[in-house]
Image (cartoon, rainbow, N blue to C red):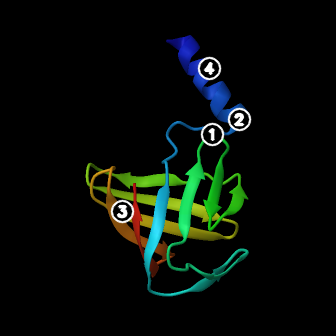
Amino acid sequence: MIVFFSLFFYFNSAYGFSPLEPSIECTVIKVLKQQDIASLKKFPKLYTSIYNNPVASSLFIAGLEFKNTDPVSQIKTATFEKVMIPVEEHELVLELNGKPISRNGVLKLGSMVLAKVTCH
């Protein structure tokens, strides 16, 4: 048991991999407000994809890669999840309702709702 935890913490710290990092695969289905965020101008746009690679600690938004980005689940229940996503100096928030297979929710910048999203 001690060996398992030692290996777990070694890989977690050495490679930036965290098995607790949420997996994100979302698509914007309705734009409510657009903002300039990092190198993304007038974000989000309709059908923008947002997904991450937890192994590489990378986040992809509309095909642009943001390295060393580790989303964090702040609240997680059987039917609700709140995920904080740091993107350079900004912090995006996903608030998702439903079961993990098919979830709908909103994408926020701080407290401002930017878009409605669907995730799987």
Disc ID at residue 108: none
Q: Amino acid at mark 1?
A: Val
- For the residue labelled by badge 3, is the local secondary structure a helix, a strand or a loop? strand
Disc ID at residue 96: 3
Indicate which label's residue lies in the foreground, 4 or 3: 3
The residue indicated by pointer 4 is: 7
Front-most of residues 69 and 39: 39
Q: Amino acid at mark 3?
A: Leu
What is the CA distance from the residue labelled 1 to the residue labelled 4?
Answer: 15 Å
Taking the spot 52% from the left edge, 45% from the top edge, the residue there is: 21
What is the CA distance from the residue labelled 3 to the residue labelled 2?
Answer: 28 Å
The residue indicated by pointer 1 is: 55
Q: Which comes before the other along the chain, label 1 or label 3?
A: 1
What is the CA distance from the residue labelled 4 to the residue labelled 3?
Answer: 32 Å
Q: Is residue 24 left or right of residue 76?
A: right
Q: Residue 2, percent across and down?
A: 54, 13
